């Protein structure tokens, strides 16, 4: 949903503003009319509301579009009303919340129309945009603003497409290696487009039979993938053998699966033995109390924090049925403390069955999973111990006061799981 007149009606009623309640629909109607006039509506909208579209195109002021939005659209503007380009523009201009931003432009016009002193008057109560007369002059003025924003967006989109049209050679090699549909995502200051693309891929993946993964375009990761899938590979500079890679994947997908719970229990026992060797109190120093954790619902691994932008990424549509099978295509483990491919597959299969966890992001040293809901509090400590066994660095190289209990407190509030190996 882009906008809902109910939000604006609530202001009118709570503040007892002396305006016709139809003013809550003013800016929605203006935006909708502009998109109809510029042929940016979806086929479904055009089919369902053909009579209204025809009237708008012929004589827009013969119909009060506010009443159409109120009565037929239930007071709401939804992204599916617009075609692919119109929807992308709406997400940029109407739904992003940063400047330029359509509601902000509406508000700025109200200040220009009334003047700063009247705009801030008690009579308007910070809702001056509702008092602008709804007429053709108003539409034409805002139409010019939308047109300007559209041209700016088109220009920026063209620049982005031009940048993306020349793929880095490493991205091309990795796409060839993955041998599946991939979208290249260049470094960005905001990861909103990445999140939207990933969410869309998740929905399509359920229907089309693939698992989406965000994969860092990174030399170290690339070398690791080749070394794991080709026994005689000399590293990232080698040309990979497609037949050998295909055999590796087939073997990884058909070999007997390890028991994920047993793998975690073995790893946990190893962590306990390490603590004992280091004279650490397991219960007090390692486990600790379940407290002081912070929730996390965002991806962290694909950020280049010094550059304040994302890493270059591939959004890969991995052609596997089950989430844990992505590691047959992305065998990035087996170094230092990082589990190898059979262990990664076994553990993530177990966590999928227990919590619905799905692999989502891979870089050369990080793995992130998503879950549909945070783990229940009563299971958080058990899961935190499993995650510590799986990836001790998330605690051992965390904050000075980090414990498994702190991790558990985070997990009960989080829908994204982060793992990092030194």
Image (tube, grey):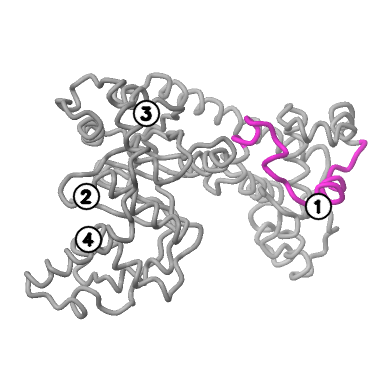
**Residue 266 appears at what percent x and percent y?**
22, 62
Number of the front mark, 1 or 4: 4
Label of residue 178 in the image: 3
The residue pinned by badge 4 equals 267
Task: Tell me the residue that label 2 is attached to.
Answer: 338
Q: Mark 3: few, some, or many residues within 10 Å (few <14, many ≥20)?
A: some
* Mark closest to the chain's N terminus, 1 or 2: 1
Q: CA distance from mark 4 to mark 2?
A: 11 Å
The residue at which mark 1 appears reads as 74
Q: Quadrant of residue 87?
A: top right
User: How far apart in space, not on screen, are marks 3 and 2 (Cα)?
Assistant: 21 Å
Marks 3/2 in contact by CB < 8 Å: the verdict is no
- The residue sitting at the front extreme is 256
Rendered view: 52 above or below 16: above
Lower position in the chain sequence, tag 3 or tag 1? 1
Q: Which residues are magenta?
A: 62-89
Distance from Cα at disc 1 to Cα at disc 4: 55 Å
The one of 102 and 165 positioned closer to us in this rendering = 165
Q: Camera-side residue: 294 or 345? A: 345
Closer to the chain start, of discs 3 and 2, is 3
């Amino acid at each position: 949903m882009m906008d809902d007149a109910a939000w604006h009606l609530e202001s009118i009623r709570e503040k007892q503003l002396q305006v016709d309640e139809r003013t809550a629909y003013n800016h929605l109607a203006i935006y909708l009319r502009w998109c109809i006039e510029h042929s940016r509506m979806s086929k479904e909208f055009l089919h369902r509301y053909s009579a209204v579209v025809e009237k708008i195109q012929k004589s827009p002021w013969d119909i009060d579009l506010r009443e159409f939005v109120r009565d037929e659209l239930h007071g709401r503007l939804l992204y599916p009303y617009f075609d692919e380009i119109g929807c992308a523009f709406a997400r940029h201009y109407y739904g992003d919340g940063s400047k330029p931003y359509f509601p902000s432009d509406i508000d700025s016009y109200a200040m220009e129309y009334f003047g700063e002193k009247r705009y801030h008057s008690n009579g308007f109560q910070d809702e001056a945009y509702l008092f602008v007369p709804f007429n053709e002059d108003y539409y034409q003025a805002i139409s010019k603003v939308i047109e300007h924003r559209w041209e700016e967006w088109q220009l920026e989109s063209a620049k982005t497409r031009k940048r993306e049209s020349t793929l880095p050679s490493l991205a091309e090699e990795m796409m060839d290696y993955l041998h599946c549909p991939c979208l290249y995502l260049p470094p960005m200051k905001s990861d909103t487009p990445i999140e939207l693309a990933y969410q869309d891929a998740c929905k399509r993946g359920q229907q089309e039979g693939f698992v989406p993964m965000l994969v860092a375009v990174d030399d170290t990761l690339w070398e690791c993938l080749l070394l794991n899938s080709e026994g005689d590979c000399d590293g990232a500079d080698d040309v990979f053998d497609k037949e050998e890679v295909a055999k590796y994947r087939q073997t990884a997908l058909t070999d007997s699966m390890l028991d994920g719970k047993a793998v975690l229990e073995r790893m946990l026992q190893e962590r306990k033995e390490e603590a004992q060797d280091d004279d650490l109190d397991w219960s007090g120093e390692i486990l600790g109390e379940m407290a002081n954790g912070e929730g996390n619902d965002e991806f962290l691994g694909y950020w280049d924090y010094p550059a304040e932008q994302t890493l270059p990424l591939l959004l890969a549509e991995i052609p596997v049925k089950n989430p844990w099978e992505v590691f047959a295509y992305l065998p990035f483990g087996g170094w230092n403390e990082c589990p190898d491919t059979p262990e990664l597959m076994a553990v993530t299969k177990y966590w999928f069955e227990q919590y619905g966890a799905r692999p989502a992001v891979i870089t050369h040293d990080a793995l992130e999973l998503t879950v549909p809901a945070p783990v229940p509090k009563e299971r958080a400590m058990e899961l935190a111990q499993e995650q510590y066994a799986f990836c001790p660095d998330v605690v051992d190289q965390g904050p000075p006061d980090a414990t498994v209990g702190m991790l558990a407190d985070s997990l009960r509030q989080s829908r994204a799981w982060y793992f990092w190996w030194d």
